[in-house]
Amino acid sequence: MKQAELLKKLLPGFIPLFVFIIADEFWGMKVGVMVALLIGLGEMAFTYFREKRLDRFVLLDTGLLVALSGVSILLENDIFFKLKPALIELILCAILAVSVFSPVDIIGTMTRKYMKGVEMNQAQEALFKRNLRNFFYIVLAHTALVFYSAFYLSKEAWAFISGGLFYILFVVYFGFEYFKTRTAPWSKRAEDPVSQFENEEWLPVVEENGKIIGKAPRSLCHRGDKILHPVVHLHVLNPNGHLYLQKRPMNKLVQPGKWDTAVGGHISFGEDLNTALQREAFEEIGLHDFSAKPIGTYRWDTELESELVYFFISYDFQKIRLHSEEVVEGKFWSPSQIKKQLGQGVFTQNFEHEYQLLLKVIN
């Protein structure tokens, strides 16, 4: 999905406004409204006969243009007309805000509906959503400028801000993106998001019930885009009921130097639960050929990622052998020791949450 395709979908709706601005300058408001109305109707007719659909954005733009212009003519006050582009953009801001900041993806739904045959994988969808977030901030800033110019600036300044500046802002944005593509080594492949991550580990993207709905590179899953992916956790206990914990290295990005679950790691795309559990246990604490009992599943969200956690319990403690640089220290903790340190910043937040779930099983 190229960034220009979204802009191509949205900008035709503003053509009646720009036509009005030019016509109004030469022949006045009444003629400008008539010309803009004809242009809007022509756009809708062209889209309908070519694509067999009614362009609702052009219809909304033209309808508001006529309605607010009519009010301005009747009251002999053009402020209502001047506010028209800002009202259009407020609607666009609302659509973008819902698509970006909520689970309801209006723009994505419209894109799939009107651009049939265009498919996006999870990596492309994440990048697409990040661009939508940028569009939202650009449109929001431009809307505020239109409101300001309508009340406090000259008609000429308003005409530039509500018309030409809208295109200029997007041209600057796409120019910046193009510059990054040509200068930054990693972004030379930006038009092909899949190849950008070809050397990364790919993780399954899942629903909360565990159903796999796609895949995404590891870096995108840890960038705050709320891509839900599965992980495995293993708790190891000895006969005394003491729990084995590992200490995270200080160079870890998340929760450095804190004590955490004995084993925790991602499930790679195409890997089943048991294989991932056995692999992670050996990599982190040298545990192999062990038996484990599934305990439960829960969702864990942070600023960086969203995980679907499958956690297990094992009593094969005698096979533990630390041999990885990812684990600097490991030891057994008694229930009383853990209880005393809860909430003191000794353990990771994820462990403290999961420990409460574990207590319901082992007590």
Image (tube, rainbow, N blue to C red):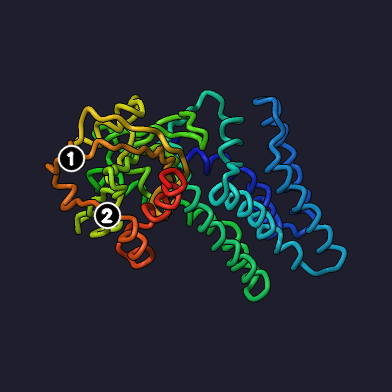
Q: Where is residue 73 in the image (x, y as percent from the top left)?
A: 83, 62
Q: Nearer the viewer, residue 20 or 249?
A: 249
Q: Name the residue located 51 percent from the left edge and 58 percent from the top edge.
A: 137
**What amino acid type is highlighted by mark number 2?**
Trp
- Secondary structure, mark 2, is strand
Q: Is residue 207 above or below residue 175?
A: above
Q: Which residue lies furthest to the right in this view?
A: 74
Q: How crowded is mark 2: few (under 14 residues within 10 Å), some or many (20 or more)?
A: some
Q: What residue did someone put label 2 on?
A: 333
Q: Which residue lies furthest to the front in this view?
A: 240
Q: Is residue 346 above or below residue 103?
A: below
Q: Quadrant location of residue 275?
A: top left
Q: What residue did someone put label 1 on?
A: 320
- For residue 67, side relative to residue 25 (left or right): right
Q: Position of residue 28 (x, y in %)?
A: 75, 60
Answer whether labels 2 and 1 touch (C-beta < 8 Å). no
- Secondary structure, mark 1, is loop
